[in-house]
Amino acid sequence: MINEPKIVEITEIIEETPTIKTFKFDWNFKTLGKPNPGEFVMVWNFSNEKPMSISQINDNELAISVKNIGKFTSELHELNVGDQIGIRGSYGHGFNNSFTGKRIIAIGGGVGMAPINAIASDLAANNEVSVISAAQTKDELLFLDSLENSGVDVNPCTDDGSFGFEGFATNCLESLLENATYDYAFVCGPEIMMKGIFEILEAANIPGQYSLERYMKCALGVCGQCCVDSEGWRICVEGPVFENTQIEQITEFAKYRRDAAGVKY
Ligand SMILES: Cc1cc2nc3c(=O)[nH]c(=O)nc-3n(C[C@H](O)[C@H](O)[C@H](O)COP(=O)(O)OP(=O)(O)OC[C@H]3O[C@@H](n4cnc5c(N)ncnc54)[C@H](O)[C@@H]3O)c2cc1C
């Protein structure tokens, strides 16, 4: 792991959806370390630095998938192949393989599909992996083809019913559970979605891991910006991935978070 940005060149840009682009860059696993699915990097565009999950882990190559929602992310979307960015990391406690059983359900909402793509493709070789890829509408669905090509059973799901299951990821999960059961789950998406998914999975006795987001500054566990109540766990070190038993102890889960000044909202 390195704690200063490594300057890399963007080797490929994929326009995944009208709002999300994937950026690929070389990453020498021997000298810079091989990240695990669920870990994140700090991305520096020479004016600001923000956290992004790793969405693909290939041979000496990584990818991030960025949703354009503000100043930093729109600046990233303006970059071209050959442009440079700084990458610091990888950081965090990612998804782990300490589960039993082979029937996996992985659920991603919106750009929350980024770390879900990395873990689902990683597990597909040795497990029966089903994915719910949820988005508001058809054009925003992520990674359907690439996941299918990895042998994953892909269940697209749109709020407006424009493609796949019509409804929220929670409704889609309930529908799948009518005819199937799973040993273990991986979840990432808007926290309100993860809360609904958590309740359904807990009721069905399906343990799992959930990836959370909080405002981050150092990503090193020093500044305390991303601590969550009530345990004070740092999302950048103890997280971003937490087991279902830990989620119960995060009292602010799906209730509130803190802005850059530490103020609750
Ligand atoms: C562990 C982790 C993994 C993430 N992975 C992805 C990913 O794979 N793809 C993706 O598109 N986005 C990801 N994000 C969110 C991403 O960091 C924000 O979308 C980005 O920082 C927004 O910056 P902006 O200037 O474009 O928008 P702004 O207008 O500044 O902010 C828009 C939103 O992004 C949040 N945000 C802004 N700055 C930060 C920050 N330093 N840390 C955390 N949140 C911030 C704000 O709270 C606000 O909700 C991740 C965040 C975390 C914490």
Image (cartoon, rainbow, N blue to C red):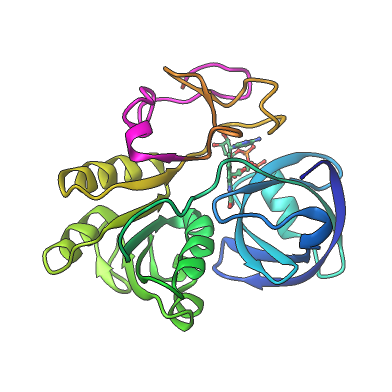
- Quarter of the rendering containing residue 8: bottom right
**Viewer-proximal residue among 83 and 226:** 226
Q: Is residue 211 above or below residue 138?
A: above
Quadrant containing the N terminus in the rendered view: top right
Which range is magenta? 242-264
Q: Is residue 166 above or below residue 192?
A: below
Q: Position of residue 121 (x, y in %)?
A: 50, 70
The answer to whether residue 152 is left or right of residue 50 is: left
Report the residue at 44% width, 75% height from top: 144
**Can the viewer see residue 142?**
no
The mark tally for this picture is: 0
Report the residue at 84% width, 45% height from top: 5
**Viewer-proximal residue among 148 and 151:** 151
Q: Position of residue 139 (x, y in %)?
A: 46, 70
- Quarter of the rendering containing residue 190: top left
On whether residue 135 falls in the magenta region, the answer is no
The answer to whether residue 201 is left or right of residue 53 is: left
The answer to whether residue 191 is left or right of residue 15 is: left
Q: Is residue 15 above or below residue 251?
A: below
Q: Indicate which quadrant contains ligand 1.
A: top right
Report the residue at 69% width, 21% height from top: 223
**Can the viewer see residue 102?**
yes
Q: Position of residue 258 (x, y in %)?
A: 52, 23
Furthest residue toward bottom = 149
Tell me which secondary structure the magenta stretch mostly adopts: loop
Q: Position of residue 44 (x, y in %)?
A: 79, 45
